[in-house]
Every structure is written in structure tokens, then in C-alpha cells.
Image: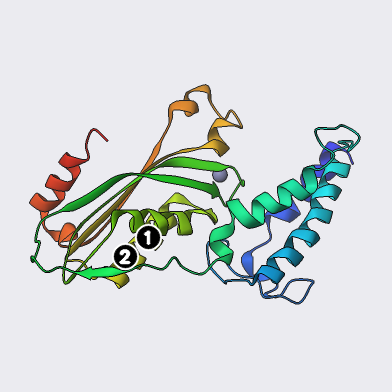
Amino acid sequence: MNKIEFEKYENDYNSKSPKDFTDINSLGFPLYDSNDNQPLSDEQRYDMIVSLEKKVAEMLDILRISRKDPNSTHTPLRVAKMLVNELLIGRYEHPPKITVFPNRKHVNNLIISQGIEVMSMCSHHWQTISGRCVIGYIPGDYVVGVSKLSRIVQWFARRPQIQEELGEQIADYIQKMLKPKALGVVIKAKHFCMIARGVEESEEETEMITSVMRGYMLNDQSLRNEFLNLIRNY
Ligand SMILES: [Zn+2]
């Protein structure tokens, strides 16, 4: 294919819109958004890994990477397992079991959990998003263990995401579970689709910050300032 043919191919490709695609895949299974969740049984996951292994092997073939290279011999199955069982596991696992506790002392102040690891994948380029998340809330009738907040973040992060939607999904979930009076979810992360592709040298240092505010945190300026001050050096 020459350059002009490729540019035509690229133009046709880029003119496709979401409605040009089907809701069911070639194996008869329903397709859904990259950051949605539909739990699979262990058997379904094994089947998925085996189907995927063949496609990853095909990708290596196309890229002319020999599996006689001992470093690549078992790469297709390794990559398939990594995608299904680790990087994208949030799509296929049930939500984490979370126990909430009554707010017996009527705590009416900010509770902040910071340093929550965010390890995700950008849905545009399938490159790593790596960073941290801070969650702050003023409880209503319930409080929750800090480790549980981290499990919720992992469950949503382990899917192909965009950072903006990741923050919204986490906030929606906590809102529904805890019904806090105020809630803030701040994510600071590096995007390897910028770093790895070398868009610009300075991109290596670039971090993206997203913040989602709910409840009093939206309208109460002094509360929001208190929250942002507490996490400022974070
Ligand atoms: Zn990207």
C-alpha cells in the first residue's frame, strides 16, 4: 500500500462513528462500553483467555516477531492472561463486598483518604494511566473503612478508562453506597499514551488532575477550600 492509499484508508477509518458498529461480537456475546462491568464466571474467563491468545499470537505474526525468540515464545498466552485477569479485571469481576458502619458519633467533619493507588489503562491508546487518588467525605448516616475505598478505586480503574469518567464512576458509586453529605474525588495521574509515544519531551512530567465534587462540596466554598488545602501538597 502506498502513502496515498494509506491516507485514504485512514480517512475512511476515521469517518466511522459509534453507530457503525454492532452490539454483538462475532462469537455471539454482547459488547459494552470499555469501562462498564458484566461479571463472568471462571469458565467464561478461561474461554476468553484462550480465544484472545490466538489473536495476540496473530498480532505477533503480523509484527513479524518470532516465537522462536525465547522471550516471545509464551508471550501470547501471558498477554491474554494479563489483560483478562489483571489489567481489565474490573470489567469481569463482581463489585467488591463493602460493609458500611453506622456513624454513631455523628461525625460531621471531613474524612480524607489519600494515596490510593490508581493503575488504569487509557481507552484511546491502551497505555497505562498511573497515579493516585484522594477521596474526602463528610459522612451522613454511614462511614466506611479506608481499605474499602481503595478496593472501589481498583475495581473501576482496572478497565480501559478515561480519567474524567473514572472519577465520576468512583464518585457515583460512593454516593450511592454511603450517601455522604459531601464528597470529593481527586485523581492525579500520568498518562503513558503521552509519555511513551513521546508526543513532547516535557510530557513526561505532565500530570492530569481531575476533581469531582458532590453534595456540600459543590456549593460550600469554605468546605471545598478546606478540602483542597488539606490535600494541596499531595
Ligand atoms: Zn490515551
Q: Bin the neighbour count of mark 2 within 10 Å (Cα to Cα): few under 14, some 14-19, many 20 and up.
A: some
Residue type (three-letter) at the residue carrying disc 1: Ile
Between 21 and 23, the one lying in front of the other is 23
Where does residue 184 sit, x and y in percent of width and height?
A: 25, 55
Q: Badges 2 and 1: C-beta atoms under 8 Å apart?
A: yes
Which SS class for mark 2? helix
10 sits left or right of 18 in the view:
right
Q: Bin the neighbour count of mark 1 within 10 Å (Cα to Cα): few under 14, some 14-19, many 20 and up.
A: many
Report the residue at 41% width, 35% height from top: 207
Where does residue 218 sit, x and y in percent of width and height?
A: 19, 59
Q: Quadrant of ligand 1?
A: top right
Which quadrant of the figure has residue 140?
bottom left
Between 6 and 194, the one lying in front of the other is 194
Q: Is residue 23 above or below residue 196?
A: below
The residue that label 2 is drawn on is: 174
Residue type (three-letter) at the residue carrying disc 2: Ile
Between 150 and 33, the one lying in front of the other is 150
20 sits left or right of 194 in the view:
right
Report the residue at 55% width, 66% height from top: 93
Give the quadrant of the N terminus.
Answer: top right
The residue that label 1 is drawn on is: 170
96 sits left or right of 141 in the view:
right
Report the residue at 33% width, 61% height from top: 171
